[in-house]
Image (spheres, helix red, strand yellow):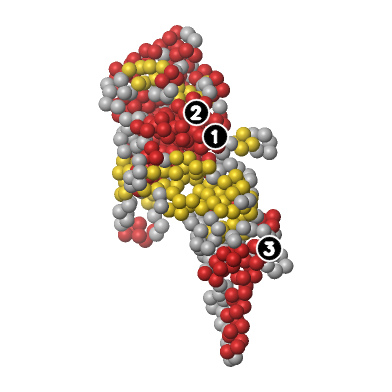
Amino acid sequence: MDFTVPVPNVLGERLSGQDVRDQNVMACQAVANIVKSSLGPAGLDKMLIDDIGDVTITNDGATVLKMLDVEHPAAKILVGLSQLQDREVGDGTTSVVIVAGELLKRANDLVKSRMHPTLVISGFRLAMREACRFIKEKLAIEIDKLGRECLINCAKTSIASKMIGSESDFFAKLVTEAVLAVKTMSAEGVVRYPIKSINILKFHGESVKDSYLLDGYALNIGRSAQGMPTRVAPARIACLHFNLQRTKMQMGIQVSVTDPRALKKICQREADITKERIGKLLEAGANVVLTSKGIDDMSLKYFVEAGVIALRRVPKDDLRHVSKATAATMVSTFANMEGEETFDSSFLGYADEVVETSIAGCDVVLLKGTKNTNAVSLILRGANDFMLEEMERSLRDALHTVKSTLESNLVVAGGGAVEAALSMHLERLATSLESREQLAVAEFAESLMIIPKVLAVNAAKDATDLVSALRSCYHPTQVGADEQHLSSMGLDLSRGVVRNSFEAGVIEPAINKVKIMQFATEAAITILRIDDMIKLVGDRQEYEEE
């Protein structure tokens, strides 16, 4: 007797099996191809124009993908992957997308040749774990052995692929000084480098080499009134998140007044409420007041008379960073549990000095000697907005790179050295496996060579010759030789030869490569596991009409 299994009627479009894998891989390859040409020191820039006509020129993978309006669900995973790499490490956003795209392409070829996706996933996981172990045990070197020059070289490697790559020596030193300046020790004795304590300000004019590092947290805003002092030392800082303007009754409240004298009293009381609040701030000992909202002229008069520096319309992010650096408490209301208005002196933050200075003709308020963490500011100079914005993105990547290097304490060689070493090691590992997973591990190994290939192509070199020369340097690892002295051979893209990347100063934080392996593998596995895609429709009637 034959049994027929009823097929459920799905309201919508359905793709399953190899069709959905092909579609997903094609979408991911399209995303990877967009950023492929921007990899490496010879990578090209992208010009992005949004719906209101604003232009962004960049070669940062995370920025490019964030601004793209990607609709395909699988491709969105790669966009999220670049954002994750940007948050976790700050650099390597282009590499992680390219590696994930190549892994997917090769995994799809294996599945087409009748290998089950579960076996491919198992092989990829095995290869990823072995790659991370090999990086940490064999390829990574502690920065204590290399000294401060190592940090500058890490920053130079990050900046070399950016628009300001020609001035990488200058900016690498600037970035390294900035990160070392904000070094702090936690209560548990752990050293941290909070790079949010580094404020970046951009000003038009002069050359990029006129950028400099300023001691103190700079706010791109001037005093609210000219009668206020330009310098206060020591500073006791109040951070407020409400208006210091004349108090007005809430919308919808109506008061009927028959006596004109009562109306005058209401107006006077509205003014007195703000005056009392300012009095409470001054009684607590505040001599610098920062608020994210407004301060009217009447309130400014009281601050001027008391010799207090008051700043209004301070950006919320800046206010948050100032409160953290000075140990101030952000106050959004004076009301306490009893319904009365109070302001305690414990809410105040402390700094050695608050001073107003002028940079490029703009008034800037500088907070020096903050209580909790040291704060510094990078002042960037450049010809136009496009240049300054790309400089800021490049320096933020470099700051993250130096921070990761200091906190992880391990570096590896750049220029495709890690990928080549891992590829050869995983090929040898694949031959030692007895299961069909060896095919997946071998394809994983081959996928990693996409990075040196793309680096060579973008530098207008012969990728086949260069990659072959690079692989030949790592051939002794195949016959069991000691890998340590061979673990730093990478590409010299200016001359088109293979060289020792450590000696040339092309180095990267080891955590960067580890995260690329982990994130790219997990993203590829997530997409590879999908064997059915159903695009549902909301309305049955609408579906039937179609």
Point 54% across, 34% down: residue: 180
> To which residue does mark 1 refer?
180
The residue identified by callout 2 is 151
Q: Residue 234: where, in percent of width, then height?
A: 63, 51
Q: Is residue 117 left or right of residue 334?
A: left
Rendering coords of residue 441 (x, y %): 44, 22
Q: Quadrant of residue 3?
A: top left
For label 3, count other residues whose C-alpha is less than 10 Å away and answer few (under 14), some (14-19) or many (20+).
Answer: few
The answer to whether residue 210 shows anywhere in this view is yes
Q: Callout 2 environment at 10 Å: few (<14), some (14 to 19), or many (20+)?
A: many
Amino acid type for the residue under numbered disc 3 = Glu
Residue occupying the point 64% across, 58% down: 286
Residue type at mark 2: give it.
Leu
The mark closer to the camera, 2 or 3, is 3
Mark seen at residue 283: 3
The N terminus is located in which quarter?
Answer: top left
Q: Secondary structure at mark 3?
A: helix
Q: Secondary structure at mark 1?
A: helix
Q: As rendered, which of 319 and 350 lies closer to the eye? A: 350
The secondary element bearing badge 2 is classed as helix
Q: Pointers 2 and 1 in contact (CB under 8 A)?
A: yes
In the foreground, 100 or 440: 100
Q: Mark 2 vs mark 1: which is more N-terminal?
A: 2
Amino acid of disc 1: Leu
Does residue 236 lie above or below 130 as drawn?
A: below
